């Protein structure tokens, strides 16, 4: 239903004018998003402001400088929850982390470096801390985990560092892992201190970041899906460079590698979207 309305409402010419205006006024994330996603966001925003046409929204945009920032915030989707797609965490626990620890132990390596790109309010990053603490207690004594969550949304990073969540964010936490949360008086839950000390959050735009290139496993879940093909390719090339040689990449369950990026990673588990950096790709671009 909304689709028809959207098609009636969104005139492509005015849409292009809006996008050009946003780009010219430093709405920094717009160039990376898919057109369809932007159309839907603009449509919903125009409806929320009770405009009857897209032209009205363009005028409003031009006359209200604050709207650029408001729109930039609106296109940032930071929905997440603990142990999102718990099956993926199960495969990590049963197959991937044991392999990584074995390899590191043979090589005498002392650190396990995990990066979560687009960490939203920290749910995924803390879930990884919990998993390591619960199932790899012995291993992490000798091989210390460094778990970093980055996001370009200021409020998300503040929220992640605070580590307080509504109950529904915990819906998929396996019952034996609920002990890692303490209930507060206001019925919210806080991640316990041990886990908080295991993870670090930083405000970073992955496209601009000069983050170190040493990650054993990179999570980039449910972010690619909003990006246009060009931005997806750029991001995957960057992830390829950030990973160590036999490093892993985990995408979201509804995401896939675009054909042009398959030269960079081999598939380890297609169902859980787990990939491994290809060592035979030497291409520079
Ligand atoms: C839908 S959330 C995904 C959260 C979590 N990874 C998950 O799967 O549950 C996408 C996150 O990506 C972040 N994001 C989008 N573009 C980004 C960029 N260029 N650099 C860093 N974070 C970005 C957004 O702010 C948002 O918090």
Image: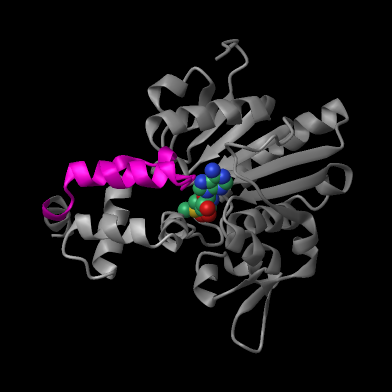
In the rendered view of the protein, which quadrant contains the C terminus? Answer: top right
Identify which residue, 125 or 152, lies in the foreground.
152
In this view of the protein, can residue 125 be seen by the observer?
A: yes
* Residue 115: % across, % down: 67, 43
Judge whether 241 appears above or below 50 on screen: above
Residue 74 found in image quarter:
bottom left
* Residue 125: % across, % down: 64, 54
In the rendered view of the protein, which quadrant contains the N terminus? Answer: bottom left
Q: Residue at x 70, y 42 (%)?
A: 114
Identify which residue, 35 or 214, lies in the foreground.
35
Inspect the magenta stretch and tell me whether residue 52 lies in it: no
In the image, taking residue 158 as reference, residue 262 lies left or right, namely left
In the image, taking residue 27 as reference, residue 238 lies left or right, namely right
* Residue 97: % across, % down: 68, 40
* Residue 123: % across, % down: 59, 60
Instruction: State the residue lying farthest toward the front.
Output: 63
Q: Which colour scheme appears in the figure?
A: one colour
Identify which residue, 227 or 276, lies in the foreground.
227
Q: Residue at x 54, y 76 (%)?
A: 167
In this view of the protein, can residue 86 be seen by the observer?
A: no
Would you say the magenta stretch is mainly helix, strand or loop? helix
Q: Residue at x 64, y 46 (%)?
A: 204
In the image, taking residue 187 as reference, residue 140 lies left or right, namely right
Q: Residue at x 74, y 55 (%)?
A: 199
Judge whether 264 appears above or below 43 on screen: above
Q: Which residues are magenta?
A: 8-35
Inspect the magenta stretch and tell me whether residue 17 lies in it: yes
Residue 61 found in image quarter:
bottom left
Identify which residue, 249 or 237, lies in the foreground.
237
Judge whether 8 appears above or below 182 on screen: above
């Amino acid at each position: 239903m909304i689709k028809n309305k959207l098609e009636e409402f969104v005139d492509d010419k005015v849409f292009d004018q809006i996008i050009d205006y946003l780009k010219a006024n430093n709405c920094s994330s717009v160039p990376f998003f898919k057109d369809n996603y932007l159309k839907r966001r603009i449509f919903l925003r125009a409806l929320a402001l009770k405009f009857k046409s897209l032209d009205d929204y363009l005028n409003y945009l031009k006359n209200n400088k604050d709207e650029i920032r408001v729109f930039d915030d609106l296109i940032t989707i930071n929905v997440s929850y603990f142990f999102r797609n718990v099956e993926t965490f199960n495969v990590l626990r049963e197959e991937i982390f044991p392999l990584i620890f074995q390899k590191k132990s043979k090589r005498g390596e002392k650190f396990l470096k995990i990066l979560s790109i687009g960490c939203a309010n920290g749910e995924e990053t803390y879930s990884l801390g919990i998993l390591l603490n619960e199932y790899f207690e012995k291993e992490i004594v000798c091989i210390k985990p460094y778990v970093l969550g980055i996001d370009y949304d200021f409020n998300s990073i503040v929220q992640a560092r605070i580590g307080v969540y509504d109950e529904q964010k915990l819906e998929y936490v396996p019952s034996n892992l609920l002990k890692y949360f303490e209930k507060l008086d206001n019925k919210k839950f806080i991640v316990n201190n041990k886990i908080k000390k295991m993870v670090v959050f930083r405000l970073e735009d992955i496209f601009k970041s000069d983050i170190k290139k040493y990650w054993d496993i990179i999570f980039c879940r449910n972010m690619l899906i909003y990006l246009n093909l060009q931005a997806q390719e750029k991001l995957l090339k960057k992830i390829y460079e950030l990973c160590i040689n036999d490093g892993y990449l985990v995408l979201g369950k509804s995401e896939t590698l675009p054909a042009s990026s398959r030269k960079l990673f081999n598939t380890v588990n297609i169902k859980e979207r787990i990939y491994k950096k290809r060592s035979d790709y030497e291409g520079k671009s």
